[in-house]
């Protein structure tokens, strides 16, 4: 009787261990987006700079994300992003203005199609964006309203459709949505 009980416990432990190896609960990813909310905010300040003879260049958002899968369908985590804009005076070539956007958002993700090499999902994120504006000394001297400042604001992102493809552990992804990750976003994701 003891041998049967020991064999049953050993079989259950082996089955539990095998299931735990197949189920990756953690995932980390990196991404780059286009037309983010911060880029759109920079357009307004860039229009002011353009009227003063400046040209602007945007970058980002560049970010990292982490999710913990509570169930196969639902995951919770967070997103960290950086984006920016700089205005360069066309006459002097000096950088008149630099904007840096730092965003941190808790996030929830719903995996509504889960296949071995393909998945589809939606997500919702909301959090805090910090904008840091730095002005060149020449700009401050010529414009009394120009000053360095730091502002904090609410920020969000809603992914309407996300698709991931690749191996069960390492995948590429592309997302369409609205908010700080951009209207289009692509990256790589690792599950463990």
Image (cartoon, helix red, strand yellow):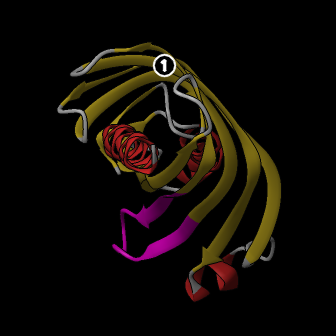
On screen, 35 above or below 115? below
In this rendering, position of residue 146 left or right of residue 56 = right
Quadrant (top left/top right/bottom left/bottom right) for the N terminus: top left
Extreme-top residue of the structure: 113
Task: In this rendered view, identify the residue nearer to me: 147 or 177.
Answer: 177
Task: In this rendered view, identify the residue nearer to me: 14 or 75.
Answer: 14
On screen, 142 above or below 42? below
Residue 182 at x, y percent in the picture? 50, 33
Q: Quadrant of residue 94?
A: bottom left
Q: Is residue 86 magenta?
A: yes
The magenta span reads: 81-99
Residue 150 at x, y percent in the picture? 77, 72
Residue depicted at x 73% and y 73%: 146
Judged from the image, the secondary structure of the residue bearing numbered disc 1 is: strand
Task: In this rendered view, identify the residue nearer to me: 27 or 57.
Answer: 27
Q: Is residue 188 magenta?
A: no
Extreme-left residue of the structure: 167
Residue 38 at x, y percent in the picture? 60, 45
Residue 15 at x, y percent in the picture? 36, 38
Task: In this rendered view, identify the residue nearer to me: 180 or 147.
Answer: 180
Residue with the mark numbered 1: 121
Label 1 packing within 10 angstroms: few (<14), some (14-19), many (20+)? some
Residue depicted at x 62% and y 38%: 70
Residue depicted at x 39% and y 41%: 4
Residue depicted at x 66% and y 57%: 104
Q: Main secondary structure of the magenta part?
A: strand
On screen, 178 above or below 43? above
């Amino acid at each position: 009787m003891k041998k049967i009980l020991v064999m049953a416990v050993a079989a259950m432990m082996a089955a539990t261990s095998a299931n735990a190896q197949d189920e990756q609960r953690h995932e980390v990813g990196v991404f780059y987006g286009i037309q983010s909310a911060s880029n759109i905010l920079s357009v307004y300040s860039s229009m002011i700079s353009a009227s003063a003879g400046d040209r602007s260049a945007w970058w980002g958002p560049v970010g990292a994300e982490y999710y913990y899968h509570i169930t196969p369908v639902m995951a919770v985590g967070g997103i960290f992003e950086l984006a920016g804009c700089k205005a360069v005076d066309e006459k002097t070539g000096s950088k008149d203005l630099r904007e840096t956007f730092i965003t941190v958002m808790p996030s929830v993700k719903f995996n509504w199609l889960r296949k071995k090499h393909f998945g589809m999902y939606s997500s919702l994120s909301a959090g805090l964006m910090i904008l840091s504006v730095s002005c060149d000394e020449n700009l401050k001297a010529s414009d009394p309203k120009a000053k360095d400042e730091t502002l904090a604001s609410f920020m969000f992102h809603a992914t309407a459709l996300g698709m991931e493809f690749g191996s069960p552990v390492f995948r590429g992804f592309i997302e369409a949505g609205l908010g700080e990750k951009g209207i289009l976003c692509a990256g790589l994701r690792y599950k463990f």
